[in-house]
Amino acid sequence: MNVDTSSPAPDAESPDPAVPEADGQRCGLIAIVGRPNVGKSTLLNALVGQKVSITSRKAQTTRHRITGIRTAGDAQYVFVDTPGFQTRHGNALNRTLNRTVLASLGDVDVVLFVVEAGRFGLDDAKVLALVPEGKPVILVANKLDKVVRRAELAPWLKGMQERHPFAEFVPLTAKRPEDVRRLLDIVRPYLPEQGWWYDEEALTDRSERFLASEIVREKLFRLTGDELPYTSTVVIDKFEEEGLLRRIAATIVVERDAHKGMVIGEGGERLKRIGTEARQELEKLMDAKVFLELFVKVRSGWADDEQRLRSYGYE
Ligand SMILES: Nc1nc2c(ncn2[C@@H]2O[C@H](COP(=O)(O)OP(=O)(O)OP(=O)(O)O)[C@@H](O)[C@H]2O)c(=O)[nH]1
């Protein structure tokens, strides 16, 4: 078994004339998959070195395909963060998510399959089953810091080896920088030898508009706790740039009148706080002054309407 060590580079593919000269460089796509709450967003943020995705204790907060970029040494790592495979409900929203998972795995060079160290449940197995055959999969056993009896991990890893022909086994703690650096080293040989796709400084190719909706959504979930169903979402109605000023208007779409009350809070206090915290964080991220207007709308049953989902940009 190959634990904590990088294996030899996979065979280099024949050069594609459409990609930049390799010139000793490596560049490739990496998908981070796993059931909700295993720490995918935490890991992505740590790998990329800056917050580009949203972490929250609430399950299923990552709905969009998010790309983070890290350039280190001769290698450029382009990360694709996919949503957790939805097993609880069978509505249109989840069907869309599953298609997103499948679509994003087809063209990646390597998959980081994240689980909680020492645990492998049906929900984990369902995600693993989505990975196309023949794709190199690195098992990332996260939250190692929570494993009290480390000795029990060896038999668990052995069991994992029998479940799937994993390319590598990496127990780690996503919150420890040295673990994350080690993971980057392990992933490196799986990136094809080809020129970089992005500037060295690029952190994300997501637009500021997208970041705005993600930040508002993060504040929304953080400040409403577990009261608010995850099907609530944020739509950006206006995003205007005037030099160092951003004028943003966003609508929080909830499913029921009662949810609207939760978001607004007594005397509008909660909505005000969501707006203030989101604005402060956006000003830091964008290095600009931000005017943020927030609205709350009830859109009953929107999670069951594929047409509407598409218009919100989930496809
Ligand atoms: N103790 C510990 N907690 C972690 C670690 N990595 C992540 N967490 C926590 O696990 C929770 C879930 O992390 P996320 O990164 O939001 O998980 P996710 O897999 O992206 O979740 P979804 O967006 O729901 O799919 C958060 O409370 C994190 O702080 C770790 O290495 N150790």
Image (cartoon, rainbow, N blue to C red):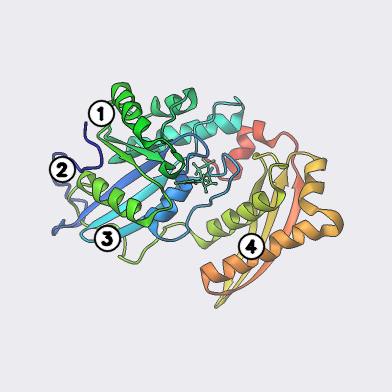
Secondary structure category for the residue under label 1: loop
Residue 51 visible in rendering: yes
Label 1, on which residue? 134
Secondary structure category for the residue under label 3: strand
Label 3, on which residue? 72
Which three-letter amino acid code belongs to the residue tagged 1? Gly
At 69% across and 66% down in the image, what residue appears? 276
- Residue 225: percent from the left, percent from the top? 69, 46
Vertical relation: 76 (above or below) 98 = below
Secondary structure category for the residue under label 2: loop
Mark 1 vs mark 2, CA separation in Å: 15 Å
Number of other residues with Cα within 10 Å of mark 4, as a class: few under 14, some 14 to 19, many 20 or more? many
- Residue 78: percent from the left, percent from the top? 34, 51
Q: Earlier in the sequence, mark 1 or mark 2?
A: 2
Residue 248 visible in rendering: no
- Contact check, label 3 and label 4, Cβ < 8 Å: no
- Residue 245: percent from the left, percent from the top? 59, 75
Mark 2 vs mark 4, CA separation in Å: 43 Å
In which quadrant of the rendered view does residue 73 lie? bottom left
Q: Earlier in the sequence, mark 2 or mark 4?
A: 2
Secondary structure category for the residue under label 4: helix
Mark 1 vs mark 3, CA separation in Å: 27 Å
- Contact check, label 1 and label 3, Cβ < 8 Å: no
Label 2, on which residue? 9
At 42% across and 38% down in the image, what residue appears? 33
Q: In this view, does 202 lie to the left or right of 248?
A: left
Label 4, on which residue? 278
Number of other residues with Cα within 10 Å of mark 3, as a class: few under 14, some 14 to 19, many 20 or more? few
Q: Which residue lies furthest to the right in this view?
A: 267
